[in-house]
Image (tube, rainbow, N blue to C red):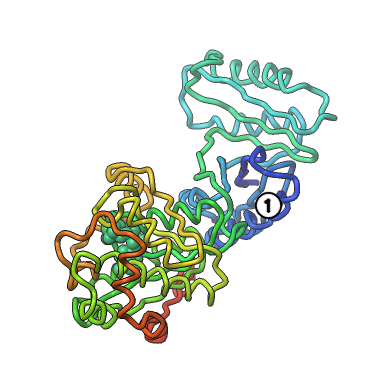
Amino acid sequence: MRVVVIHYHEIALKAGNRGLFIGRLMGNLRKATGGKGVHGIQKQSGRVILKLRRDAEWPAVRARVGRVFGVANFALAARVNPRLPDLERAVGDGLTGRTFASFRITAKRAFKEFPLTSQQVNEHLGTFVLRLTGARVDLTRPELTVFVEILPGEAYVYFEKVPGPGGLPVGVGGRVVTLLSGGIDSPVAAYRVMKRGCPVTFIHFHSYPFLEKTSQEKADALAAHLTQFQYASRLYLVPFGEIQREVVLSVPPPYRVVVYRRLMARIAEQVAQKEGALALATGESLGQVASQTLENLVVIEEAVRLPILRPLIGMDKEEIAAAARAIGTFETSIIQDQDCCTLFTPKHPVVRSTVEEIRRVEGRLDLSALVAGGLARAAVEEYAFPPLAAG
Ligand code: ATP
Ligand code: MG
């Protein structure tokens, strides 16, 4: 019978969290592989096993499992009885159609009552493969590795170990509201947050009808794409143009970007409260643009009580772009649009604002009315993965 053997990094688990971790991992694997022919899922000696129906397509299952956070590595395996003749048969079957000049057997025994040690299994099956194929044993650089795992009651044989994304299963951590701009950085920040086990609620600020709708369409596409890592998402689309107009009436040009950012943070904090989120996150990295100096980040933080996570803080643009390509958000992010913060904004924002200065210019604004108005006019989109229509 074909199964997928999934390994996770147990070393990172504290005893009290193990049950939560594995429960989430199994639940997420079930959601991720929905509609792909997985008909059972079980826990087995520090592994998770997915049972595949006969008609399950491995490439599709492989792509899905490869995106589940918490998976260290996984393999398509044959499940057999833990007895030498059955192991020989599984190895022999698995070798048909493969050509290789050198090989090794890598056996692991998590079942100490099994009569042979791992080394004895290596030697026994090594001799078997050698006789069958004439290939030579090479322990350091084999062309083919035959993996054998012997557990209580069953054994697994496989030939290719696929790396997983690592991280922690989404749901083991607290919720985080992520400010999603439509640019390259914030989707990567959202991915990083999810990879640490925290489900994300997205919030996007747009200046429609002052500017085109493109930024909302990008945020929508990005939220839909990122949902494949957390299975269900919500996106708040907050109209920001009116708020910006108010700001323009009383805030001198150099301070506007920082004031916009503080207003975004305040609105996001309200959404966090509604959603039960414990933190905010942005795609900011230190010194990338004038609005992201340490001084300005400090001033933005001061507007809210929740911590603002900045997973990209020490990355440079090339590293972030490479990550965006790997995640699959880059192509959407580079679509031309009009960033809301370019509306009514000068080319040269203040590089080092102070809390005192900003509070003084904000003093002329009715902040709580602006925040409440933005929140009240927000539209909310829901996403599911696999998409409901597609099953
Ligand atoms: P990004 O590539 O994510 O747009 P950026 O390098 O363009 O980042 P900024 O435009 O200064 O940097 O934005 C910094 C962060 O503020 C973004 O990463 C995002 O988290 C948040 N942000 C900016 N504009 C918006 C917006 N319109 N809606 C939601 N969040 C935003
Ligand atoms: Mg941007």
Q: In the rendered view, does 101 fall on the left or right side of 125?
A: left
Residue 202 visible from this viewpoint: yes
- Residue drawn where x is 26% and y is 70% of the image: 215
Q: Residue 222 location, x and y as percent?
A: 35, 64
Q: Is residue 387 above or below residue 92?
A: below
Residue 220 visible from this viewpoint: no
- Residue drawn where x is 69% and y is 31% of the image: 87
Q: Is residue 276 above or below residue 143?
A: below
Q: Secondary structure at mark 1?
A: helix
Q: Residue 37 location, x and y as percent?
A: 56, 59
- Residue drawn where x is 20% and y is 71% of the image: 252
Image region (quadrant) for ligand 1: bottom left
Q: Residue 97 location, x and y as percent?
A: 48, 32
Q: Which residue is mark 1?
A: 22
Q: Residue 112 location, x and y as percent?
A: 82, 29
Q: Amino acid at mark 1?
A: Ile
| Residue toward you, 234 or 23 | 234
